[in-house]
Image (cartoon, rainbow, N blue to C red):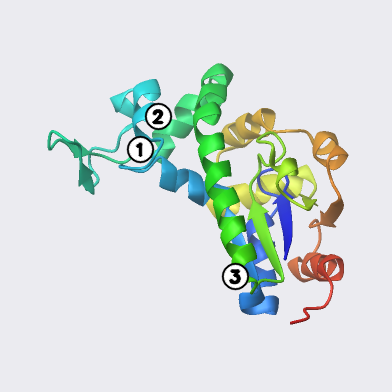
Amino acid sequence: MQVIGITGGVGSGKSALLSGLCQRYGARIRVIHADDVANEVKAPGGMCYNEIVSLLGEDVLDREAEAPVRDAEGRPLYPVDRNKMARMIFSDRALLARVNAILHPAVRGTVRHAIEEERKNGRLRALFIEAALLIEAGYEEIVDEMWVVTAPEDIRIRRLKEARGYSEEKIRDIFSSQLTQEQFLAHADRVIDNGGTQEAAIEQMIAYLGPDEE
């Protein structure tokens, strides 16, 4: 089983390409989205929940949502509001670094465990780990190869506006918090150009991955 990190700036189209790749290879590949794991570990009862709430304060909680669990004293634990958290950390780089210092080790440990389990099972052709921050979070020590998805900035901006409804200001804030294109490419074992059609980019990935052999 090959373990592949797939990264690139926000809006480069990583998730969509992986979804298309899964349709080609079926159950022989698995994708772990690091953001999904981060949501799990900071959810009520998750290993990072208390630290995140302690750091950001209870104003970060969504008190309109259902509280799925309660603490030892029976008090409801409300989920972290992702939009509130994003507004807090993307405008404060020091705070962003502190949040990452909490979440990244927990997510990385969870991913390592998943890799170990899949190696034991022996059913996969490849396991992909996807996130914008794989390089900064030290995943080069974990993966066999690092693939970087690229796309021109204007295309990334258009995708984020259309798919997520982000404002130009929010997009620029996120861009400024991530690695530059040159920095991503300096860590790339493989580069996928996603500035054209999705089909063309998926074909590049298939060429890199090679034929699926049981």
Task: Give the distance between the C-alpha atoms of the residues marked 2 and 1, in whole angstroms.
Answer: 9 Å
Q: Residue at x 66, y 39 (%)?
A: 133
Task: Give the distance between the C-alpha atoms of the residues marked 2 and 3, in whole angstroms.
Answer: 34 Å
Q: Quadrant of the C terminus?
A: bottom right
Q: Which residue is mark 2?
A: 52
Mark 2: which secondary structure?
Answer: helix
Residue 82 appears left or right of 149: left
Sequence-earlier tag: 3 or 1: 1
Residue 165 appears left or right of 171: left
Towards the viewer: 109 or 149:
109
Residue 37, position in %: x, y?
50, 49
Mark 3: which secondary structure?
Answer: helix
Q: Amino acid at mark 1?
A: Val
Q: Is residue 67 visible?
A: no
Q: Quadrant of the N terminus?
A: bottom right
Sequence-earlier tag: 2 or 1: 2
Q: Is residue 114 visible?
A: yes
Q: Residues within 10 Å of mark 2 (few under 14, many from 20)?
A: many
Residue 78 quadrant: top left
Residue 152 appears left or right of 6: right
Q: Amino acid at mark 2?
A: Ile
Mark 1: which secondary structure?
Answer: loop
- Residue lying farthest to the front in this orientation: 120
Q: Which residue is mark 1?
A: 80
